[in-house]
Amino acid sequence: MTKVVFFKSGDTYWGFEEQGHTGYADAGQDVLCSALSAMTMLIINAIDIAYASDVDYQIDEETTDIRVIARGALPDYESDEQKRYAISGLIMAYFYQLSDLI
């Protein structure tokens, strides 16, 4: 089973961590795991490229654990309020997307 923990400060989502395998099918054949990976990479690329903000991420290829930190969602790291809102909103949308699956 995959466990996802979101990092939040007040109403601001600024990162998340995914641990474990979904267990829907064998590794390499699991469509749920692929969906999580695709959504995660979309978030990383959107923050990095579309919003031109630094995003720190680590992917453990053996365990499939992923950690994503987007400090650009926080006022201490990003002065542009619209950019902070967009980054946090993207992570928040992922939270609600996953909430719909359970």
Image (spheres, grey):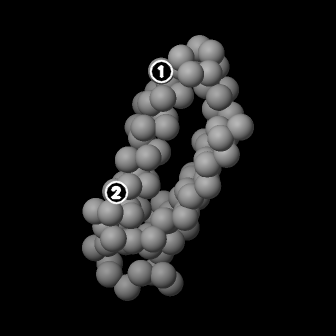
Asked whether 75 or 72 is in front, the reply is 72
| Horizontal side of residue 68 vs 65, given as left or right | left
Above or below 12: residue 60: above
Q: Name the element at disc 2.
A: helix
Residue 71, position as x, y percentages in the image: 51, 71
Residue 69 lies left or right of residue 64; in this view the side is left
- What is the count of numbered marks? 2
Q: Secondary structure at mark 1?
A: helix
Task: Looking at the image, tell me whether mark 2 or mark 1 is earlier in sequence order.
Answer: 1
Q: Does residue 99 show up?
A: no
Crowding near the residue tagged with mark 1, few <14, some 14–19, many ≥20 C-alpha atoms within 10 Å: some
Please state the horizontal and vertical placement of residue 65, each as a whole percent of the image: 66, 43
Q: Is residue 49 left or right of residue 63?
A: left
**Residue located at (67% from left, 45% from top):** 60
Residue at 34%, 57% (x, y): give it: 46
Which residue is found at the position 48% from the left and 65% from the top? 55
Labels 2 and 1 touching (C-beta < 8 A): no
**What is the spatial separation of the Cα atoms under label 2 and label 1, in whole angstroms?**
22 Å
Front residue of 95/2: it is: 2
Identified at 44% across, 46% down, the residue is 41
Q: Dividing the picture into quarters, in which one does residue 89 lie?
A: bottom left
Quarter of the figure that contains the N terminus = top right
Q: Position of residue 12 (x, y in %)?
A: 46, 65
Q: Report the amino acid beneath label 2.
A: Ala
Q: Which residue is mark 1?
A: 31
Residue 46: assigned label: 2
